[in-house]
Image: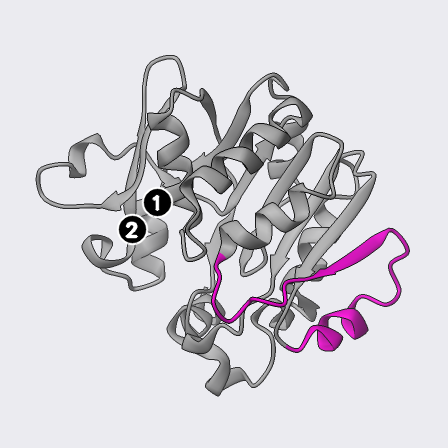
Amino acid sequence: MNLILLAAGKSSRIYNKIKKNKCLIKINNKSLIRNIIDNSSEANISEINIITGFKSQNIKNELKDYNKIKFTNNSKYKTTDMVYSSIIGLKKSKLDTIISYTDIVYTKKLFKIIKNSNKNFITIPYIKNWKSVWKKRNKNIFEDAETFNVDKNSNLREIGNKINDKNLKSVNGQFMGAMFIPKKYLNIIIKRYNIYSNGKLQLTQFINKLIKDNITIKCINYNDFWYEIDDYEDLINFKKL
């Protein structure tokens, strides 16, 4: 199994405060990206491919002591988004693949539940206690969170739309910033991206398009610690935890 870590962007909402790549923020003396890599150690990861762009050398310097990491440059990082970086990585993968954001904090359990999940389907871990997390982050759920609707068979039915008073009750959780793609789906995902052809497509919007094209996406509940550092306020609130 391969692991693709998305670390190409400048993260302009927080960069002026931290003056470094967001994935290099340290939590308990360990950078966010290093924490993810270390947590993946028991998941039989064959290769880690980090998609870089903005100040890529900083990330390479941080991870120079790891020997199974490859770096792929997204030269269009200024005009593209997470999906484009993901596709760059998927084109180089020939195995089952996990894609992960690098501005999030989670435990080894994420890799364990993916490892033990059904490998025949695209799979997304999600958090059910999202409202308490958003409260800790001091975020307005109607401005910051998105829809995430799961049916009784654990199939994802909707993701990535704005939450409002009408659809709030149907929100079953939140996307964590990670997903599993079986190797048999790699080319399908790449072809779908070429059809949608939108360099600024958000990952959740891309996933929603896959659902509408009748691609089954399974969901698994992750019930351990998770946190996202989207902006400087998130970082300050995390340090208060």
Residue 80 is covered by the magenta coloring: yes
Q: Which mark is residue 130?
A: 1
- Across and down, in percent, residue 236 comes to 43, 75
Helix, strand or loop status at disc 1 = helix
In depth, the one of 233 and 120 nearer the eye is 120
Query: Residue 151 occupies which quadrant of the picture?
Result: top left
Q: Nearer the viewer, mark 1 or mark 2?
A: 2
Residue annotated with mark 2: 145
Q: Which mark is residue 91?
A: none
Q: In the rendering, at what x and y percent does residue 99 appear? A: 61, 44
Indicate the secondary structure of the residue bearing disc 2.
Answer: loop
The residue positioned 56% from the left and 71% from the top of the image is 22
* Total number of numbered discs in the rendering: 2
Measured along the vertical axis of the image, is residue 27 above or below residue 216?
below
Q: Is residue 199 left or right of residue 93?
A: left
Q: Residues within 10 Å of mark 1 (few under 14, many from 20)?
A: many
Q: Residue at x 68, y 42 (%)?
A: 91
Dot 1 amino acid type = Trp
Q: Tell which of 238 and 90 is nearer to you.
A: 90
On screen, residue 110 versus residue 218, left or right, reads right
Q: Is residue 39 visible?
A: yes
Left or right, 144 with respect to 122, comes to left
Identity, as a three-letter code, of the amino acid under mark 2: Ala
Along the viewing direction, whichever of 106 and 89 lies nearer the viewer:
89
Looking at the image, do the residues carrying marks 1 and 2 touch, with CB atoms under 8 Å apart? yes
Gap in Å between the C-alphas at discs 1 and 2? Answer: 9 Å
Q: Is residue 27 visible?
A: no
Start-end of magenta stretch: 55-81
The picture places residue 216, in percent across and down from the top left corner, at 45, 20
* Residue at (64% x, 50% y) in the render: 88
Q: Residue at x 29, y 64 (%)?
A: 138
196 falls in the magenta region = no
